[in-house]
Image (cartoon, helix red, strand yellow):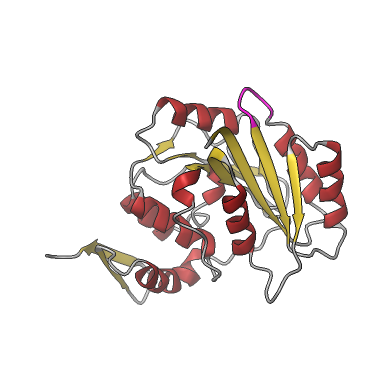
Amino acid sequence: MENGFTLVIPLYNKVNAIRTTLDSVLNNHGEYPFKCIIVDDDSTDGSSEIAMEYDVKYPDTFMYIKKKHKGGHNPAYARNLGIKLAETEYIGFLDGDDELCEGFIDRGCMFLDEHPEYSMYGNGHKVRDLDDTITEWNYWGDNIHGLIDYMNGGGCLVCFCANIFRTELTKNNLFSDILCEDSIFMFKYVYQNPNVYIDSNFTDTFIYNKKYSEVNPWVEDRRYIIETLIKEIPDIKYEFYIDENNTVFYREKQE
């Protein structure tokens, strides 16, 4: 793999946000080389033209790909295509209506360079609410137990955009074309590669824009995610139970 970072952005009808998103990517130019792959799922609102503009103007930074969608507009295909095309050592993901914070790529990639024992670097993020107020969110602990507990506490899903992954490991852990594909990807990645590093000193990863994004609350999706995980990881070593209040309990399976 080449020394560098690949950022994958799935795009579908984000005309009000995509320019801000791509400008935030440009602001990340630092010491570490990176490429941004934009996979457009047949947008119809003018998003495509904006993304193509950046591809033409900044060819060393952006690679624009348009696919004719079949069925629903699920970002799993776009992210998987980005993973397959990535030739760099590290990879990350950003939604087409959010913003990447300046300096995150250098910080995360340099840490992984210095610490080959870790499979992932992550930290907190920020949320821009409908009234433009910014709230900082800390992240979950550095293991699968912390991830479950964080989600149990009503966190903003798993915020998988706040991470830098090792590309070779993501190639063995593609996104499933299902609901909550990002949460399930994170569970599978951390379960299979448990030595992750969460830097609690920073929330400057990305800004989640509630102005443009719609998200299904974790409290409504817990049962579905747990049932899907059991199917996706047949030999999973945890037993799960969800009570009438949608709280998740778990323990390691007994031998």
In percent of the image, x 78 and y 43: which residue is there?
A: 20
- 30 left or right of 91 in image: right
Q: Is residue 29 above or below residue 173?
A: above
Q: Residue furthest left?
A: 255
The residue lying toward the viewer, choosing from 72 and 240, is 72
Residue 139 appears in view: yes
Task: Tell me what residue is drawn at x 19 percent, y 65 percent.
Answer: 253
Q: Nearer the viewer, residue 49 or 149?
A: 49
Which residue is pictured at 37% across the width and 57% down the height? 148
Q: In this view, does 173 lie above or below 71?
A: above
Is residue 111 inside the magenta stretch? no
**Could you say which is closer to the camera, residue 45 or residue 152?**
45
Q: Does the magenta stretch include residue 30?
A: yes
Q: In which quarter of the image is residue 103?
A: top right
* Res. 137 visible in picture: no
Specify start and end residues of the magenta stretch as a single range: 29-33
Where is residue 160 shown, x and y percent of the image? 52, 50
Magenta span: predominant SS is loop
How many numbered circles are shown? 0
Q: Which residue is drawn at 42% across and 25% down?
A: 114
Task: Give how far across and how far down residue 108 sits, in percent.
Answer: 51, 32
Across and down, in percent, residue 181 comes to 53, 64
Q: Using residue 163 as the reference point, say whether residue 102 is left or right of it.
A: right
Above or below — where is 118 with respect to 191?
above
Question: Going by the image, does 4 lie left or right of 244?
Answer: right
Which quarter of the picture shows residue 92?
top right
- Quadrant in which the C terminus appears: bottom left
Residue 158 in the image, given as x and y percentages of width and height? 49, 54
